[in-house]
Image (cartoon, rainbow, N blue to C red):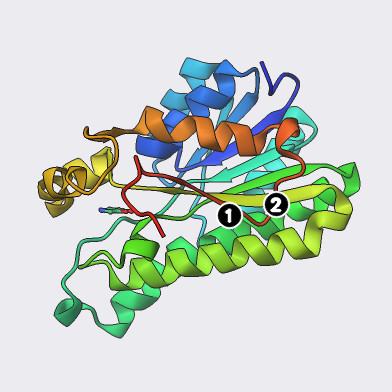
Amino acid sequence: MKLENRVAIVTGAAQGIGKAIAEKLASEGATIVAADIQGDLAKETADALGGTSVQVDISKEEDAQRMVDETLSAHGKVDVLVNAAAIVPFVPWDEVDFAYWRNIISVNLDGPYLVSRAVEKPMREAGYGRIVLIASNAFYAGTPNMGPYLAAKGGVVGLTRALATELGKYGITANAVAPGITRSPATLNSPHKDAFDFVQALQAIPRHGETQDIAPAAAFLASEESGWVTGQVIVADAGHIRD
Ligand code: 4PL
């Protein structure tokens, strides 16, 4: 139980990798604030785990702030932020226009920035914090049909390093998990579902990835014992990308 007495906000907790991370952190003893733009599903996650929920659009500065304010009102502190909320697009490059680009960058890069900024103040005051962002191995692989997503996830790696550098002196670490292709609503209800067998052939471990395969890396980075690790990316993808 490496998260006993810890309060953890998990964005994207309605479904997929975010939900699996919320479940894993709860199993390690954390009190969960399940956050998602799909507020009803976030509440279902929270109810199952004995936590609280908040409806939030992470690309809105006021929403990100309200999420943290409500966490402090309900639980008195915030030890951990895991940002799993993201759009997982499959759009051919020739169909990407600037409005679409902006939307993906807004949710997948502005979002992690805004939620990290919102938790920074209470974490600094406490002299303790664990920020865990979700990148993607698609950034390293250059996966097709995800142009703005690749740019945003590369930005998440840069943001992770910036947060680690700027906040280390306050007892706050910042790290990222970069999943490979994972069975979730986002991939299974999109053309990504047809890529699993191709990607499996590139993996060291020959099976399809599940959300539960990603959660333990996030739990480690969310825990106190990871305190000497900061600014890093753990690639959790069955060995798909090897540099
Ligand atoms: C390799 O992050 O990393 C599909 C969909 N394939 O979202 C991803 C790979 C997808 C990925 C991703």
Q: Label 2 crowding class (10 Å Cα cut-off): few <14, some 14-19, many 20+?
A: many
CA separation, marks 2 and 1? Answer: 27 Å
Secondary element under disc 1, as helix, strand or loop, is: helix
Q: Residue at x 47, y 32 (%)?
A: 215
Viewer-side residue, 51 vs 171: 171
Q: Which residue is mark 2?
A: 230
Q: Residue at x 70, y 55 (%)?
A: 118
Q: Residue at x 19, y 42 (%)?
A: 200
Q: Amino acid at mark 1?
A: Asp
Residue 143 spot, x, y in % from top left: 26, 64
Q: Which residue is mark 1?
A: 63
Vertical order, 110 against 115 (above or below): below
Foreground mark, 2 or 1? 2
Q: Residue at x 45, y 43 (%)?
A: 12
- Quadrant in the picture for residue 243: bottom left
Residue 240 spot, x, y in % from top left: 31, 49
Residue 16 spot, x, y in % from top left: 35, 36
Q: Between disc 2 and disc 1, whose residue precedes?
A: 1
Asked if residue 106 can be seen in this view, the reply is: no
Asked if residue 54 can be seen in this view, the reply is: yes
